[in-house]
Image (cartoon, grey):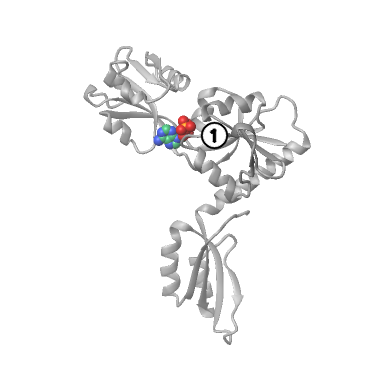
Amino acid sequence: MLRIALPNKGRLSEDVRELFNDAGLEVRSMGDRALTASLGGEFEAIFVRSQDIPEFVADGVADAGVTGWDLVCESGCQLEQLLDLEFGRCRLVVAAREDSGIASVDEIRGSPRVATSFPALSRSYFDRSGRKVEIVPVSGAAEIAPHLGIADIVVDLTSTGSTFRMNGLREVATILESTARLISARPAAPRSEEKTRALGELVMALGSVIRARDKRYLMANVPRAKLEQVRDVLPGLKGPTVVDILDGGTHVAVHAVVAASAVYRTIAALKALGGEGILVTRIERLMP
Ligand code: AMP
């Protein structure tokens, strides 16, 4: 059994469930008090708080886990990153009161108080930038600390910056960029062959779904005489697949994987080359 620690609630939990479902590892049967669940085959999930996942994986309570890179870094645990899951994107930033006039870390004077739920990362950041600060640990909602007179500066996560703006705070520096990651412990002793294989299969299953998400499969009928130009428009993984059509040979069907963001441009370019019958579909998984 490979045990995987997953967030039980909070911002990451929905996206994690969706990813595991898409990879064919959906929650099958919940165990006692919904703390554990079978994911099918040799995989079992335990549902815990995102903040606790680095510790649980480092201690061997779980063989792997999914949590934010910010929490992995804050934990200071020796962990191995197996896969970037590309969601839960956010930044850990330093923000100061708009009315403080501070626009960069260099302008921080004296020894201000810094409210944060990331004391370790904040401490090491201010140490590195040679600023003396007093860290005030809070368990969340650091952005209200300046209003309460608890701190002059905050270090907190943001994705759009709107919470800071709403609270009259200005971002002055980025400490860390984060996304959700699949992690495992750095084992003192070599892992069993079985565990190594199961972890490899997990990375492959999740990775193939992530890789496919921003890609589309495009098919079009194009004049055979234009194939050289079509190759420039449709690079695909190894160049497009070309399939005969029973139309006497004037047209061929081309199939290729394209970036989702490039689909509109590609369709226009294919049309300009006489392409027709263009079809675009999503891809469930992609293994290069
Ligand atoms: P939770 O505390 O369980 O809701 O999980 C919070 C995690 O979600 C953080 O540690 C980040 O990795 C991630 N996250 C993504 N966007 C944001 C955001 N705008 N604010 C806070 N956390 C975020």
Vertical arrangement, residue 253 with respect to residue 47, above or below: below
Q: Residue at x 61, y 43 (%)?
A: 27
Mark 1 C-beta closer than 8 Å to ligand 1: yes
In terms of depth relative to the viewer, which is nearer, 91 or 56? 56
**Which image quarter has ligand 1?**
top left
Vertical arrangement, residue 151 with respect to residue 248, above or below: above
Q: Disc 1 marks which residue?
A: 7
Tell me where residue 151 sits by quadrant. top left
- Say left or right for 233 vs 209: left
Q: Report the quarter where the N terminus lies.
A: top right
Q: Callout 1, which amino acid?
A: Pro
What residue occupies the far bottom of the structure in this picture? 248
Tell me where residue 272 sits by quadrant. bottom left
Q: Residue at x 47, y 39 (%)?
A: 88
Residue 78, position in %: x, y?
61, 25
Label 1 secondary element: strand
Q: Residue at x 56, y 68 (%)?
A: 255
In terms of depth relative to the viewer, which is nearer, 270 or 93? 93
Q: Residue at x 55, y 26 (%)?
A: 52
In terms of depth relative to the viewer, which is nearer, 128 or 254? 254
